[in-house]
Image: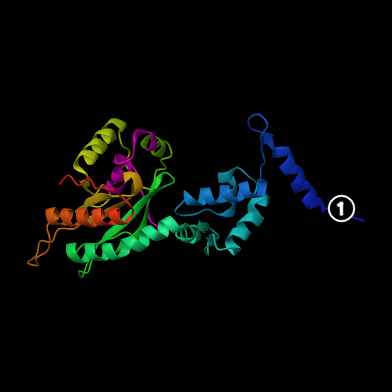
Amino acid sequence: MKQAPAPEQQQEHAEAEAEAAPEGEGALRYAAPALEKGLDILEALADSPGGYTLNELAQKVGRKVSEIFRMAVTLQRRGYVQVDDNDRYTLTLRMFELAHRQQPLKSLVSAALPLLRELANRARQSCHLTMYQGGRVVVIAQVESPERWSFGLKVGVVMGLTDTSSGHVLLAFRDEIDRARMLRAHIGVEGELDMDPGELFAILQEVRARGYSAMPSQQTRGITNIAFPVMGAADHVIASINVPYIERIDQKSAPDAVQVRGIVGNIAARLSALMGASGYNDNE
């Protein structure tokens, strides 16, 4: 005799059937309530650098604590979230690590790192490689300056899309449809400056015409960001190489901003060739 499902299983099955709804003629959309809860938690934590307590998290995702408790514990056990001494939940780098298992990203980072090391040694500056991801810009590789001091960004850091040179490059070298989609999906990061759409459009036009972006940092005084696009197959921009340039004012001889710009352009062109770009638009 077949054993009847446990009451909890019956309830979950009923919820799944109740939430299944038609989507288009002859098609069904099947909901997964438990998965929805987990994704809600991950997305909420991704937007909060300080994390949330369980009560705050429940309010953020519009659910009761009892609804998300087991899901939060499971995500913690699997290494996707962590809990500090103040019972605040934050994301770990688990999802970032998973993203790096993707072959296209692994191939890009593997090809880029030797060139980034060369760039750092030639320019005597730190440098990093960024990509567009989910409405923001994320650092996927970084190399420190060989000098005694340096300024760099950590791998995994997210940056603004509209107020950074990396973001400008990633937007400027997309077509209008892609650019509009990216801006619609834009998620502001902590401290990101508001950008007038007309001003942003003019900046992107200038960046595309020049072939690169060079601008004073909008986050840190004394830094000039120099960014070039990394192109892939079909000459589609896939990443940006950025140097947060620091000018030396002592007697040590080092490449100036113009020389560093030439080095970054050279490295970006070579990485683009490795990524399958047929040509590189360096207008210098």
Q: Is residue 198 visible?
A: yes
Nearest to the observer: residue 236 or residue 136:
236
Figure quadrant of residue 139? bottom left
Compared to residue 198, the image places residue 35 above or below, namely: below
Magenta region: which residues?
Answer: 156-178
**Residue 160 seen in this snapshot:** no
Q: Which residue is mark 1?
A: 4
- What's under tag 1, amino acid-wise? Ala
Is 85 positioned to the left or the right of 212 in the image?
right
Residue nearest the observer in this picture, 191 or 8: 8
Residue 153 pos. (x, y %): 32, 59
Q: What residue sits 49% from the left and 54% below the top?
A: 51
Q: Nearer the viewer, residue 241 or 219?
A: 241
Q: Quadrant of residue 204?
A: top left
Q: Residue at x 74, y 41 (%)?
A: 17
Q: Position of residue 248 (x, y in %)?
A: 13, 61
Position above or below: 124 against 235: below
